[in-house]
Amino acid sequence: DLVKDEDLEIITDLGAGNGGTVTKVWNKKRNCVMARKLILVDAKPSVRKQILRELQIMNDCNSPYIVGYYGCFPVDVHVGIVLELMDAGSLNDIYRHIGPIPIEVVGKVAEAVLHGLMYLYDVHRIIHRDIKPSNILANTNGEIKICDFGVSGELINSIANTFVGTSTYMSPERIQGAPYTIKSDVWSLGISLIELALGRFPFTDSQGNEEEEEEESDHEEFDEDATLPLSTQRPKLPVPSSSDNKKEKRKSKGVSLAGGGHTMSILDLLQHIVNEPAPKLVSKRRTYPVEATTFVQDCLYKDPNDRKSPQELLASDWISKSKVTQDDLKTWALSTIQKD
Ligand code: ATP
Ligand code: MG
């Protein structure tokens, strides 16, 4: 039986995005913590009912790579969705907090996302449509799962009506108006993986220039052992007290409509994605295994026909030869939390 809003007591805020706010809640009936997302839906009652009906598909989405679903209900002008709490947060939160993600962990992120995408498509014929670091979540059990996939057409429509949903993880063919395919999700995965490995969004007005490399030095204290085997990594020192300023700075960098000195306007960015070569997994500060750079390149062919499928990518060396275990991921996830 599904969770109701009256079963839930608010504990704390987990984050907010364009369309919603997420809260950590206590479920009094089941005696456990959960995550409740409230999405503002500015639509008439019939549409809201339709959305709630469509969301029921999530009931049947059972996979170790998909964030668990416990129920949904109307909450005044919102639609509430109750989800499994992922206690290490999103990969976006994690890298903004601790800096670049070790490349071995990024490989496991890729594997989990691909399994999740294949499950959604093969079992439910669902295309995710919104792969990005904030929709990839981790927990201290060493699991990585995806959330916020496009189950409800009505929900997609009503959110698109309330704000401009221009995604910067969007593939060149989508920007040019082609319909979504699973290959568009593969592109978004490629962009996300580079972002996690570099610790910054990969598109800039002059890709990989000095200034960007300099900004990365915010994370210098974390970088040195980023390529060591996981088992040898120690929990790291707390971030210096100036980290809050840096966090603020980081939040406002990359793509911003406000357009600070070094950022691209959204239109420049979309034009760049369509017209310029795809980004690569390269950094002046770090080297990456060739299996990783090849994998990312295979995700980022601009022609979707050249781009590899999730099946092909799962069979690649980077994924199939990874030695990282779930225990390693547990240790890593715990270390990201202990940095508070
Ligand atoms: P956007 O709205 O642009 O897609 P977003 O994905 O960050 O951005 P939300 O989906 O509303 O926006 O999520 C907000 C934040 O809440 C996420 O970045 C993540 O940190 C946190 N979050 C979401 N779902 C969960 C969950 N199940 N467990 C733990 N944290 C979560
Ligand atoms: Mg999200």
Image: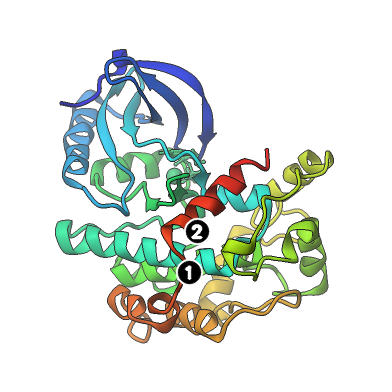
Which of the image's four quarters has the N terminus?
A: top left
The residue labelled by disc 2 is 328
The local secondary structure at tag 1 comes to helix
- Please name whichever residue, 61 or 257, is drawn nearer the observer in this view of the structure: 61
Q: Marks 2 and 1: CB-CB under 8 Å?
A: no
Q: Is mark 1 within 8 Å of ligand 1?
A: no
Looking at the rendering, which quadrant does residue 176 occupy? bottom left
Residue at image location 18% in from the left, 64% down from the top:
122
**Identity of the residue drawn at 67% across and 66% down:** 226
Residue at image mark 1: 107
- When asked about the image quadrant of residue 115, the answer is bottom left
Q: Give the x, y percent position of residue 337.
A: 60, 42
Ligand 1 has an atom within 8 Å of the beta carbon of the residue at disc 2: no
Residue at (50%, 55%) from the top-left corner? Answer: 133
181 or 260: nearer the viewer: 181
Answer with mark 2 or mark 1, whichever residue precedes in sequence.
1
